[in-house]
Each structure stands twice: as C-alpha cells, then as structure tokens.
C-alpha cells in the first residue's frame, strides 16, 4: 500500500498562473491538492504572470529568491492560437526545466493544451491537480 506524500509544516509554495477567467479552476484545484497533502492555505502564494511568454522570468525570479520551497506553473493554450501553441509552450517547458536544474528549485508545470476554450474547461482541474501532485512529491522529499 502506497501512502500519499505529505507536505511538511510551513512549506512555502507558489502558484504561478497566467490568470484569466478560465484558469481560476486550475488555481483552486492546485491549492486543494496542497492543502490535502498538509500545506496551510496561508503558505500558498498565487503569483500572476502576464502571459506564457513571461512565465520563465517570473519563475526564475522566484527560484533565485529562495522564498519558496516549490513552484507550480499553471496556464492554458488554445491550438487555434498557433504562435502560442507551437512556439511559446515548448519554450516555457524548456526554460522551466533549465531553471529547475540550475537552481535546484522543485518546479512542476500544468499547461492545458486545448482545441477550444470550452474543451479547456473540462481538463483544467485535471491538469492542475496532476502538476500539484508532482510538486507535492518533489517538496516532500
């Protein structure tokens, strides 16, 4: 029987989000995972990024500050927005991986890739929960 990872007391977590009306369920889902794993709501900070393009800059700043024990990144991209879908999303993943390996900061990414805004609504929570669970594993070590 496997046990769920537990977040230590006073573990400080950040949720970086490209916030719009559609990403609020993602933020709630990630926070629920963290609280269920033992985090206190007051130890979870929500930090807005203006766009996907800006995520690496925001995350690098947080990682270098050492104010947080881990960061989860949440956003969504529509396949109809070709530039964002084909160019920005892969670059965000690459940049986040570089930041994680260079700073040692536990990071997890949840970007919902969808055909339409309506399709995104059905996967937002799942994508955010998966990313939050990944981060929970990383910070509980």
Image (cartoon, rainbow, N blue to C red):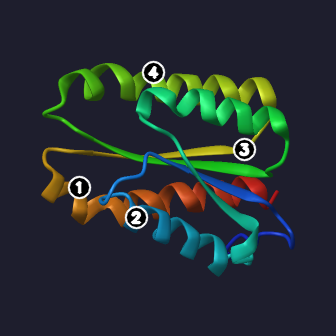
Residues at badges 1 and 4 in contact (C-beta under 8 Å)? no
Residue in the image at 28% along x and 60% along y: 123
Residue underneath mark 4: 91
Residue drawn at x 76%, y 68% is 43
Mark 2 and mark 1 residues within 8 Å of each other at the beta carbon: no
- Marks 2 and 3 sit apart, C-alpha to C-alpha, by 23 Å
Distance between the alpha carbons at the discs numbered 4 and 3: 18 Å
* Residues at marks 3 and 1, CA–CA distance in whole angstroms: 26 Å
Residue 127 at x, y percent in the picture? 40, 57
41 shown above or below 24: below
Q: Earlier in the sequence, mark 3 or mark 1?
A: 3
Local SS, label 4: helix
Residue 39 visible in the shown view: no
Of marks 2 and 4, which one's residue comes earlier in the chain?
2
Residue 40 in the image: x percent, y percent? Answer: 74, 77
Q: In which quarter of the image is the C terminus?
A: bottom right
Q: Nearer the viewer, residue 39 or 58?
A: 58
Instruction: Report the residue marked by disc 1.
Output: 120
């Amino acid at each position: 029987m496997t046990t769920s990872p537990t977040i230590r007391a006073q573990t400080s977590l950040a949720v970086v989000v490209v916030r719009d009306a559609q990403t609020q369920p993602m933020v709630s889902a990630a926070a629920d995972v963290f609280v269920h794993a033992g985090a206190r709501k007051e130890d979870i900070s929500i930090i807005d990024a203006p766009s996907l393009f800006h995520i690496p800059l925001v995350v690098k700043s947080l990682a270098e500050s050492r104010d947080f024990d881990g960061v989860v990144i949440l956003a969504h991209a529509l396949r109809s927005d070709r530039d964002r879908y084909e160019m920005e999303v892969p670059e965000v993943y690459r940049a986040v991986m570089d930041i994680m390996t260079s700073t040692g900061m536990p990071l997890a990414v949840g970007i919902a890739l969808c055909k339409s805004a309506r399709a995104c609504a059905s996967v937002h929570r799942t994508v955010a929960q998966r990313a939050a669970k990944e981060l929970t594993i990383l910070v509980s070590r």
